[in-house]
Image (cartoon, rainbow, N blue to C red):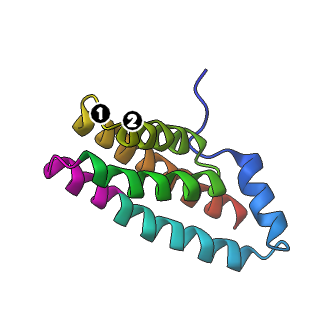
Amino acid sequence: MNRPAIDPETLDHLLEITGGDVEFLDELVDTYLEDGRAQVAALREAVAANAVDDLVRPAHTLKSSSANVGALQLADACRALEAAARGGTVDDAGATVEGIAAAFDAARDGLLAARTERG
């Protein structure tokens, strides 16, 4: 069974720990989306440069921030990439990074849909 791109319980928890401040949650999401685009770009640059070591930091950063907003599938993919890159070998790095990019796009869509649903 496929999980949704955004885990609603995790996002609800984030809203709860921000004191129910929807505006602040929206700011956090916007910051996540902006930074996430930069991390995906850094992953693509590392692949283009064939620099496995350069995959570690953006994978780690995107893993952590994705988990915080409920993008659990994306966080899992980044965790796997980070571990492989730390090990020095990433099988089909290009396809892996493009899968992460697609998962980021799905997470973005899910977060924006959740925002719309909240009103």
Magenta highlight on residue 9: no
Q: Nearer the viewer, residue 53 or 103?
A: 53
> Residue lying farthest left?
49
Magenta highlight on residue 43: yes
Left or right, residue 116 beside residue 52: right
Left or right, residue 18 beside residue 63: right
Mark 1: amino acid: Thr
For the C terminus, the image quarter is bottom right
> Residue lying farthest top?
1
Residue visible at 21% across and 49% down in the picture = 51
What is the quadrant of residue 64 in the picture? Answer: bottom right
Mark 2: amino acid: Ala
Element class at badge 1:
loop
Left or right, residue 7 beside residue 30: right
Residue contact between numbered discs 1 and 2, judged by CB atoms under 8 Å: yes
- What residue sits right under mark 2 in the picture? 84
For the N terminus, the image quarter is top right
Residue visible at 28% across and 60% down in the picture = 41
Q: Nearer the viewer, residue 98 or 80?
A: 80
62 vs 19: above or below: above
Percent across and percent down for residue 78 are 46, 44
Q: Which residues are magenta?
A: 40-51
Q: Which mark is residue 103?
A: none
Residue visible at 21% across and 57% down in the picture = 45
Residue visible at 14% across and 50% down in the picture = 48
- What residue sits right under mark 1 in the picture? 89
Percent across and percent down for residue 58 are 39, 57
